[in-house]
Image (tube, grey):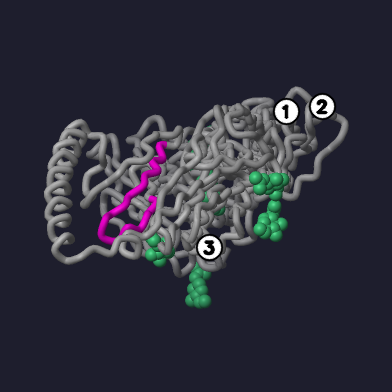
Amino acid sequence: MSPLHLQKTLLLLPLLFLTLLHHSAWAKVEVQVEESVEAYLGDPAQIPCLYSFTDVESEPRFVMIQWFVRVSGSSSRIRIFYGDGDQQIVDNNTDYSGRIEVTSDGRGSKLSIQDVRLQDEREFLCQINGLSAGNAEGRTHLRVFATPEAPLIEGVSSGISVTNELPSKVASCEARNGFPKPNITWYRNGSPLNSEPGHVNVLILVTRESSGFFSVQSTLEYKVLKEDTDSQFSCELSFFVPGAIRTAESSSVNVTVHYPTTMVELWKESPQGLVKEGETVQLRCQGDGNPPQPFTFSREQELDVDLESNHGDVLTLSPVSRKDSGIYQCRPLDSEGNSDVKGEMQLTVHYLDPAVVVPKESEVMLRGEDLTATCNALSSLETSIVWYKDGKRVGTGNTLHLKDATYQTTGEYICEVTVPSLPALHTSGSVNIIVQGGPQLVGSDQDVQLEEAAGRTVNLSCEATGRPLPNLSWSLSSSQSYQEVVSRSNDHEALSVVSVLVTADFSAVCNASNDLGTESKTFSIRAIPRLTSAAPFSPAEGSGIIIVVIILSLLLLAILGSVLYFLHKKGKIPCGRSGKQEITKEKTTKDDIVVEMKSTTKTEDAVLLKAVNGDKPNDQ
Ligand SMILES: *[C@@H]1O[C@H](CO)[C@@H](O)[C@H](O)[C@H]1NC(C)=O
Ligand SMILES: *[C@@H]1O[C@H](CO)[C@@H](O)[C@H](O)[C@H]1NC(C)=O
Ligand SMILES: *[C@@H]1O[C@H](CO)[C@@H](O)[C@H](O)[C@H]1NC(C)=O
Ligand SMILES: *[C@@H]1O[C@H](CO)[C@@H](O)[C@H](O)[C@H]1NC(C)=O
Ligand SMILES: *[C@@H]1O[C@H](CO)[C@@H](O)[C@H](O)[C@H]1NC(C)=O
Ligand SMILES: *[C@@H]1O[C@H](CO)[C@@H](O)[C@H](O)[C@H]1NC(C)=O
């Protein structure tokens, strides 16, 4: 306290004493102040202090105004201002020296504080002393506010297991440099989380900075549930501002929730559809746990044998065979003794074995015989069998009946085995059927008898069927010379035509033979002496005879014509033939072969004609 100040106080003391003495008897002074005044840090603050006297007549001329501040943590006070009618003094060496200003009029005093500091959060007292009117004081609490920094949240990056027995740290939130102390509230998906023993713990750490600010750190401990995988956690900061409470929200964090596997699924990932032998099969196992766990794979038949899986959740079987069919299982590697948690599936590997055809490879059968061939291929699925010969479908099903075999029956029979439900599976087998038979001469039932003018040539035709292909050989009587002019054959038909110069009667034998037999056909040819050389006529006689011959010939022709016409009408003679025809033989064999003799007077050559099944006659 300055000497001047002290002097003044000492001077006033007796007055004060008097005032107190007569307090109840004299007029009273009344002070009216606000309970509190609020201001932001750094802002100016004004604390008003109004006074009045109960007895207006005795209102004193002399009023003394003093402002004090309370020393925190004690009941003592420090004066910061003194004023009376003469002087206005801001006390030296206080927190407020140079920072305050007091304005007064007859009714009140107003303390103005500049640049409000944190230390200004205290009680301000205004004391009015009206001497005889007595004295009074009012107290105002100055509240200082500093907005804290925005809250910072930090989530826990490691996974949190739902099996943890106690709440685990989920996130922490910090708000720095606020005044007064701010609060932190936790939110989960927008709803506040209140402390709840065993489920939610909130640990708060409040720090008073050297600067006087409060920093608050809050840690949320929470017992996570599986559903919290998608939960968003945030913290909200609430702090006082003059006349209100404000809030500031942090950003949201999520947590990685770890939970055990309770369900496992096993399925075939590839290939799509039915599986056949030789393919690569991938089975995938998936559980509902987090983090995803590796699995062990096994077959139900041999549970104790673990199968190799390359990615922990995929079992690759390559290539599969029917032996790989069966029930497969997968279990979480760390199933924590809970072996009930497993995935299971049935794998079926389909197959089609090579076709087995009976008879094998090739089979010889005789003409007219019957044969039943079978074709079988073992498969896990229903098969369909079709028989083909020369690219044409000849039968279906696993048996093929060949009845009354002919040489055309000969050939390769292929059975195609397919699996309609799995077209990629197919196989085939084949058998070679060879139909054999002894030689059969075409038109061999009757021997052939011919007449031919001597000196002409006659063509003798011999045709035979049979397998192996018959050998055709000729033998002629009386050392007749002959020449083979046609020799043709296919796999079961042989044709031989020999040309013989007729000099005298002779017979010819065509011998058809193969391993299975021999058959022969005999041609008997009668040589007719030549007319020209045997009958020399005179011209006169000759003309008469010629006329008679002509007439007879005409008559004969007419008769012949009508006979031919009649036969033609009945369809006995094939169309398209011209000239005279003498039918020496008209016999339809089994193979419908017609052998006929045709002779014309002009050439008087004998021609053997043949027609097979409506074929054109052989070229002459
Ligand atoms: C306060 O100090 C100033 C100078 O430092 C001086 O002039 C003044 O008289 C002092 N006032 C009081 C009340 O001591
Ligand atoms: C969780 O947060 C991470 C990064 O913070 C983000 O990548 C992920 O998508 C979030 N998950 C959910 C479910 O919000
Ligand atoms: C902080 O919490 C306390 C206790 O619940 C409460 O009295 C005070 O008003 C709160 N402060 C704010 C800024 O919300
Ligand atoms: C006999 O056959 C040969 C060859 O086909 C032919 O050239 C010849 O003219 C025929 N002879 C007779 C008399 O038909
Ligand atoms: C067929 O006849 C020829 C001669 O005419 C003979 O050389 C051959 O061995 C005969 N073949 C058979 C199978 O009889
Ligand atoms: C026909 O040929 C076979 C075998 O070559 C022979 O055994 C048979 O005697 C022959 N027959 C005639 C009539 O020539």
Q: CA distance from mark 2 to mark 3?
A: 80 Å
Q: Of the residues under marks 3 and 1, which one precedes in the sequence?
A: 1
Q: CA distance from mark 2 to mark 1?
A: 8 Å
- Which quarter of the figure has residue 245? top left
Assess disc 2: are there few (<14), some (14-19) or many (≥20) residues with their C-alpha within 10 Å of its C-alpha.
Answer: few
Q: Amino acid at mark 2?
A: Gln
Label annotation for residue 327: 1
Image height check: is 261 above or below 308?
above
Which secondary structure lies at badge 1? Answer: strand
Which secondary structure lies at badge 2? Answer: loop
Residue of label 2: 301
Foreground mark, 2 or 3, reads 3
Q: Nearer the viewer, residue 491 or 327?
A: 491
Residue of label 3: 484
Q: Of the residues under marks 2 and 3, which one precedes in the sequence?
A: 2
Q: Residue at x 87, y 31 (%)?
A: 304
Mark 2 near mark 1, Cβ–Cβ under 8 Å?
yes
Residue 595 in the magenta stretch? The answer is: yes
Q: Quadrant of the C terminus?
A: bottom left
